[in-house]
Amino acid sequence: MSQMLELREEAREALEKFWFISSLDETERTDITLSLRLHIRHDLFVQVFFGEKSGSLYLALIEAGRRLFGIDREAGVWHVHPFEAVEKHEPLMESLEPKPLLKFLARVEVLLLEHDLL
C-alpha cells in the first residue's frame, strides 16, 4: 500500500479513535500529494500535508488561521515546532513511525487539555 493510502486510512482511524475529532475532509489530492483536515471545532483543526515524491509530511494544529504546534518530516528527518513557539525548528529525537498521524494526535490531545483549547 502506498504511503498516501496508508495516511488516508490512518486519518479514518483517527476519526473513530480520538474523541475530539469531529470530522475529516480531504481538502486536496493529486497523483503525488494529499491534504487532509481533521476538524476539532469551528476554527480549530489539524492540517496534514503529504508529498509522495519527497516523502515530506507536515502535521499542524491550527487555530484561527495560525499554527499553534507542528511536527514535520523532511528528507526523512523529523522536527517539531513547539506549542506557542512555532517559528522554532527543534529536532525530534524519536520518529513518529509507524502511524505518524495517530502519534501526532496523541500529542495534540495533551495540548488541548493542558491549554484548555476545547
Image (cartoon, rainbow, N blue to C red):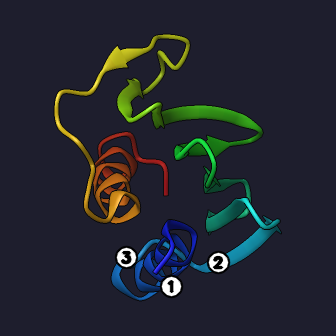
Q: Nearer the viewer, residue 90 or 68?
A: 90
Give the mark count: 3
- Number of residues whose C-alpha sits closer than 10 Å to that of mark 2, classed few (under 14), some (14–19) or many (20 or more): some
Q: Quadrant of the N terminus?
A: bottom left
Q: Which residue is mark 3?
A: 18
Residue for point 57% across, 69% down:
4
* Percent coordinates x, y for residue 37 in the rendering: 67, 64
Residue 67 sits above or below residue 1 on the image: above
Residue for point 38% across, 51% down:
108
Counting residues from the start of the chain, the first of labels 1 and 2 encountered is 1
Q: Amino acid at mark 1?
A: Arg
Q: CA distance from mark 3 to mark 2?
A: 12 Å
Q: CA distance from mark 1 to mark 2?
A: 8 Å
Residue for point 73% across, 63% down:
42
- Number of residues whose C-alpha sits closer than 10 Å to that of mark 3, classed few (under 14), some (14–19) or many (20 or more): some
Q: Amino acid at mark 3?
A: Phe
Counting residues from the start of the chain, the first of labels 3 and 2 encountered is 3
Helix, strand or loop at label 1? It is helix
**Residue 12 badge:** 1
Asked if labels 1 and 3 touch by Cβ distance under 8 angstroms, the answer is: no
Task: Give residue 36's quadrant in the image.
Answer: bottom right
* Percent coordinates x, y for residue 74 in the rendering: 49, 31
Q: Nearer the viewer, mark 3 or mark 1?
A: 1
Q: Nearer the viewer, residue 117 or 69?
A: 69
Task: Give residue 115's quadrant in the image.
Answer: top left
Q: Which residue is mark 2?
A: 24
Helix, strand or loop at label 3? It is loop
